[in-house]
Image (spheres, helix red, strand yellow):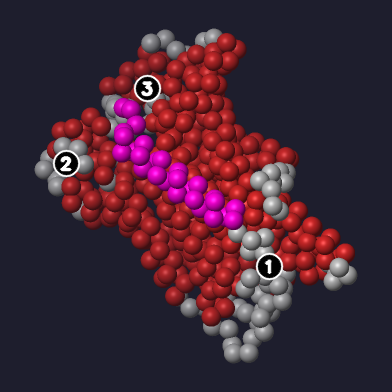
C-alpha cells in the first residue's frame, strides 16, 4: 500500500495540492505557537513578566487550540476533494477485492506522505514566523525583552504530531464514502449527486446548532471584566455554528438560492435561468462551495466586529476612569494590545479560510469537466458556459456571504451583550464591506480560472473518458 499511495501522489499531484497547502499552514502555525510556548517555558529564572497583555504562554495556547480546530476543518475539506478526484480508482480497487481496511491504509499513507513532504518548509516558515511574532510582542511590551525562540526541535516535532493527528482523523472521515458502500455500488457513488439530506444528518445539524447556541449564551452571560473569556466563547461558538452550517448546508443553500434566483431569472432569462437551475439541482455541490465562503466571511466578520466592539468598551472604560481621575493610560494601552492580538488571530483564521475556499472552488469546478463537455456537445459555446459560471460564482459568493454574516451576527451579538450590555454591537461598515468584497474576489477567480481549463479539449473524448485525465 505505501507504493500505491506514493504512486497516487505522483500521478495526481494537483489533487493533493489543497491538502498539502492545508497541512503546510497547520504545521507552520503549530510550530509558531509551540516555539512561543517553548520560549516562555525555557526563559531564565528571574525573567521579568510582560508589562501588558495576558502573557506569552496564554497567547500561544489560546491561538494554538483555535488553529488546530480550524486546521481540522480545512484538512477534512481538502482531503475530501483529493479523494473525490481519485474516487473511481479507489472504487476499482475495492471491486478488485481490496478490503475497506486496505483502502483506509492507502488513504492514511497518502496523508502521511503529503504531511512529511511539506513538513520541512512548514517548520522553517513556523520558526521564522515565531521570531517575527515574538519581536512584535516585545515591541508592544507583551513579552519580556530577554525571551528568544529556542533552537529545540520539540516544537517542530509537536507540530508534526498535531498535523498527523489532524490528517489521520480527517482520513477516517474522508474514507467512509468509499469504504461504506458495497464494492459495486462504490463505482457509481462518485458520479451521482446525493439525494435528500438524511434524517441523521439533519438531527446532527440541529444538535450542533443547539450546542453553538449554548456557547453563545455562555459568552453573552460573561461579566464585562472577563472580555477574553467572552471572546473565546463567542469564537468557539462561531466555529460550532459553522460546523452546523456544513451539516445543514444543502437545505440552507437551496432556500437562499430559491429566493435569490427569481430576480436573477428575470434579469437574465437565459444565463440566469441556467445558473439558477444548476445550483438548485445540485444542492450538495452548492453547499460544498458556499460553506468555505461562509467560513471565511463568518470568522472574519466575527473577529472584526468583536474587535470594534471591544474598542468601544475600552473607550467607555477610559472615559469612566478619566471621570474618576484614575487616568486613561492603562486602559488605552490594554485596548491597543487586545486589538492587535485579535487582528493577528484574524489574519491566521483568514489564511486557513482562504485555503479552504480556493481549494474547494477549484476542485468542484474541475470535477465538472464532463458536464461542461456534454453542454458543449449540446450546442453551448465556451463563451456562454463561462457567462453561466460567472453568474454561478456571484450567486455562490452572495449565498456564502449571507450565511457567514448570519453566523457573525449571532456571535458578535453575544459578545456585545457581555462587554457593553447590549446585543447591538459596533459594526464597522467599511471593514465588513471589504470582507464581502474579498469573498467575491476569491470566488470569481476560484471558479472561472479552472473553468477556462475545464472547457478546453475535444468534448467528445472528454465525455467518453469520463472527464478525467
Tell whether position 155 is magenta.
no
Say what secondary structure mark 3 lies in: helix
Identify residue for label 3. 371
Q: Nearer the viewer, residue 99 or 226?
A: 226
Q: Which residues are magenta?
A: 195-221
Q: Are marks 1 and 2 in contact (CB under 8 Å)?
A: no
Viewport quadrant of the C terminus: top left
Q: Nearer the viewer, residue 227 or 140?
A: 227
Side (left or right) of 356 relative to 222: left
Left or right of 42 on screen, residue 183: left
Majority secondary structure in the magenta region = helix
Bin the neighbour count of mark 2 within 10 Å (Cα to Cα): few under 14, some 14-19, many 20 and up.
Answer: many
State the residue at coordinates (14%, 47%).
99
Q: Which residue is mark 2?
A: 94
**Image: 388 above or below 233:** above
Is 203 covered by the magenta stretch?
yes
**How far from the left and from the top, in percent, is residue 110?**
30, 52
Residue receiving disc 1: 136
Instruction: Using the image, determine if residue 297 lies above or below residue 35.
Output: above
- Left/right placement of residue 332 relative to residue 295 reads right
For marks 1 and 3, give the one nearer the viewer: 1
Instruction: Tell me which corner region of the image, top left, top right, bottom left or bottom right, holds residue 453.
Output: top left
Q: Is residue 123 left or right of residue 12?
A: right
Structural distance between the alpha carbons of marks 1 and 3: 50 Å
Label 1 neighbour load within 10 Å: few <14, some 14-19, many 20+: some
Task: Give the total number of marks visible in the rendering.
Answer: 3
Where residue 52 sits in the image (x, y, percent)?
Answer: 71, 72
Q: Earlier in the sequence, mark 3 or mark 2?
A: 2
Q: Residues within 10 Å of mark 3 (few under 14, many from 20)?
A: some
Amino acid at each position: 500500500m505505501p507504493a500505491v499511495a506514493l504512486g497516487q501522489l505522483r500521478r495526481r499531484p494537483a489533487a493533493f495540492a489543497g491538502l498539502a497547502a492545508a497541512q503546510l499552514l497547520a504545521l507552520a502555525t503549530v510550530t509558531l505557537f509551540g516555539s512561543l510556548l517553548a520560549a516562555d517555558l525555557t526563559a531564565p529564572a528571574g525573567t521579568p513578566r510582560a508589562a501588558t497583555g495576558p502573557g506569552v504562554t496564554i497567547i500561544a495556547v489560546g491561538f494554538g487550540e483555535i488553529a488546530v480546530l480550524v486546521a481540522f476543518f480545512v484538512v477534512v475539506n481538502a482531503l475530501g476533494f483529493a479523494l473525490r478526484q481519485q474516487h473511481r480508482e479507489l472504487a476499482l480497487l475495492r471491486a478488485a477485492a481490496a478490503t475497506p481496511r486496505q483502502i483506509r491504509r492507502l488513504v492514511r499513507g497518502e496523508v502521511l506522505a503529503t504531511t512529511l513532504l511539506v513538513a520541512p518548509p512548514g517548520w522553517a516558515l513556523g520558526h521564522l514566523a515565531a521570531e517575527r511574532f515574538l519581536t512584535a510582542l516585545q515591541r508592544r511590551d507583551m513579552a519580556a525583552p530577554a525571551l528568544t525562540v529556542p533552537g529545540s526541535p520539540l516544537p517542530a516535532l509537536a507540530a508534526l504530531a498535531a498535523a498527523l493527528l489532524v490528517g489521520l482523523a480527517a482520513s477516517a472521515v474522508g474514507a467512509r464514502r468509499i469504504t461504506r458502500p458495497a464494492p459495486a455500488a462504490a463505482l457509481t457513488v462518485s458520479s451521482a449527486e446525493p439525494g435528500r439530506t438524511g434524517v441523521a444528518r439533519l438531527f446532527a445539524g440541529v444538535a450542533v446548532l443547539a450546542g453553538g447556541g449554548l456557547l453563545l449564551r455562555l459568552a453573552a452571560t460573561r461579566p464585562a471584566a472577563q472580555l477574553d473569556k467572552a471572546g473565546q466563547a463567542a469564537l468557539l461558538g462561531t466555529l460550532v455554528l459553522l460546523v452546523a452550517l456544513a451539516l445543514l448546508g444543502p437545505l440552507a443553500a437551496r432556500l437562499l438560492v430559491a429566493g435569490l434566483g427569481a430576480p436573477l431569472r428575470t434579469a437574465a432569462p437565459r444565463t440566469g435561468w441556467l445558473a439558477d437551475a444548476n445550483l438548485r439541482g445540485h444542492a450538495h455541490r452548492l453547499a460544498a462551495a458556499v460553506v468555505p465562503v461562509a467560513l471565511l466571511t463568518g470568522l472574519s466578520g466575527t473577529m472584526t466586529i468583536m474587535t470594534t466592539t471591544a474598542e468601544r468598551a475600552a473607550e467607555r472604560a477610559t472615559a469612566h476612569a478619566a471621570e474618576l481621575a484614575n487616568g486613561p493610560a492603562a486602559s488605552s494601552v490594554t485596548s491597543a494590545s487586545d486589538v492587535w492580538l485579535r487582528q493577528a488571530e484574524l489574519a491566521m483564521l483568514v489564511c486557513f479560510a482562504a485555503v479552504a475556499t480556493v481549494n474547494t472552488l477549484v476542485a468542484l469546478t474541475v470535477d465538472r469537466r464532463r458536464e461542461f463537455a456534454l453542454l458543449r456537445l449540446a450546442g453551448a459555446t465556451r463563451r456562454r458556459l463561462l457567462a453561466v459560471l460567472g453568474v454561478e460564482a456571484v450567486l455562490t459568493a452572495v449565498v456564502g456571504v449571507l450565511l457567514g454574516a448570519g453566523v457573525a451576527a449571532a456571535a458578535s451579538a453575544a459578545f456585545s451583550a457581555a462587554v457593553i450590555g447590549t446585543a447591538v454591537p459596533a459594526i464597522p461598515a467599511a471593514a465588513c464591506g471589504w470582507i464581502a468584497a474579498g469573498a467575491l474576489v476569491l470566488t470569481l477567480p476560484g471558479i472561472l480560472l479552472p473553468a477556462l481549463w475545464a472547457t478546453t479539449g475535444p468534448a467528445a473524448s472528454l465525455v467518453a473518458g469520463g472527464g478525467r485525465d
